Amino acid sequence: MDKNWKTKTKLVHAGSRRSQYNEVSEAIFLTQGFVYETAEDAEARFIETGEDEFIYARYGNPTVAMFEERMAALEGAEDAFATASGMAAVNGALFSALQAGDHVVSAKALFGSCLYILETLLPRFGVEVTFVDGTDLDAWAAAVRPDTKICFLETISNPTLEVIDIAGVAGITHSVGAVLMVDNVFATPVFQKSLQLGADVVIYSATKHIDGQGRCLGGIVLGTKEFIRGTFEPFLKHTGGALSPFNAWVMLKGLETLSLRCEAQAATALYLAEQLAGHANLARVIFPFLPDHPQESLARAQMSAGGTVLSLDIKGGKAQAFKFLNALRIFKISNNLGDAKSIITHPATTTHQRLSPQTRKDLGIGDGLVRISVGLEDVEDLLADLHSALNTIS
């Protein structure tokens, strides 16, 4: 691969491996194991595997390796390791690097499953976790300690779309010798390069924009070769959260159109946010590139676009939010995002329902909040659908 290739070229060609047949589309290697010519070859490979040598699909696979290499090229990372899902990536990144007695500082505005790992699982194994307002750099500085090992955040929080100063948090994290891990799903690898801003480890749910068509689960962790091969890989290959070769192939196909899809979806999201702002039945429209977003200037500095997700705060709480959701015709009610189809969900009763009412209130997840993932439909059809549904609210 030419290091000077631009993003769209990398998305199509980076990491490609061809068999002796010189196929155009990447091959799917649906195999669990690999054959060795001799016992000596098997012994040598278990001591050290070469670039095109594999042992077992849980450890690595040619199709999965293509996906990892393409993602590393896109993100500007030294290395990457693919996982069975986005949460397998988050869980593996944290657990592989921590042990009893360690301290973690995390932004408190997180996806429900991420909160479960940090609030429930890590403390169960003797890891202390301190939660802070992710947008407050003073809070990060006050929370880190000499024994802090990891700082963790979503670069754009789910579903309230808070934008965090990655460079600022990175400076605080590194001042105590800790590692900054970021979940960059909402910003996407197209719109934001978190490693360049100071993050050490970047995590994606490939289930979202990378697949982009609602087909497969997948995740990936990117960082230095030392972290990926020395810390993360031993944990994942022995605990079993590997990505299947077929899913890796689907993700490779998704990457080919990732930039085109995300750019179109982000343009639509901005247009919808601008058109809906000030609607009589909305308490607020939340989108990082709107002038009233608290971190608008930061979002524009860190990102080339505002992302593909916006949130609406419906006046009247749950009852009116449900009435709005049920009146939509194009938008589909689902808890996924990053899809070619426009999707809407009510976080308080779905993705964040396990949180207490007080915790949801503290996070800004009110009963009227709905999260919209913008798809590839015609923008005017989407706007008309939203207006029609909003007009059903009393």
Image (tube, rainbow, N blue to C red):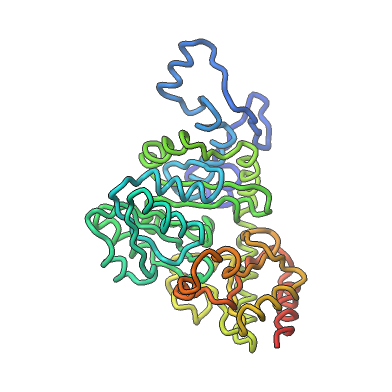
Is residue 102 visible in the rendered image? The answer is yes
Q: Position of residue 342 (x, y in %)?
A: 69, 65
Residue 226: name its quadrant.
top left
Q: Tell whether 334 sits left or right of 329.
A: left
Which residue shows up at 47% across the image and 44% down it? 3
Image quadrant occupied by the C terminus: bottom right
Tell me if residue 285 comes above or below residue 359 in the rendering.
Answer: below
Is residue 108 or residue 385 the one in the foreground?
108
Tell me if residue 251 comes above or below residue 237 in the rendering.
Answer: below
Which residue shows up at 64% across the image and 81% down it? 275
Tell me if residue 297 comes above or below residue 40 in the rendering.
Answer: below
Q: Position of residue 363 (x, y in %)?
A: 46, 72
Is residue 300 visible in the rendered image? The answer is no
Residue 194: name its quadrant.
bottom left
Q: Tell whether 313 sits left or right of 40.
A: right
Which residue shows up at 45% across the image and 54% down it? 117
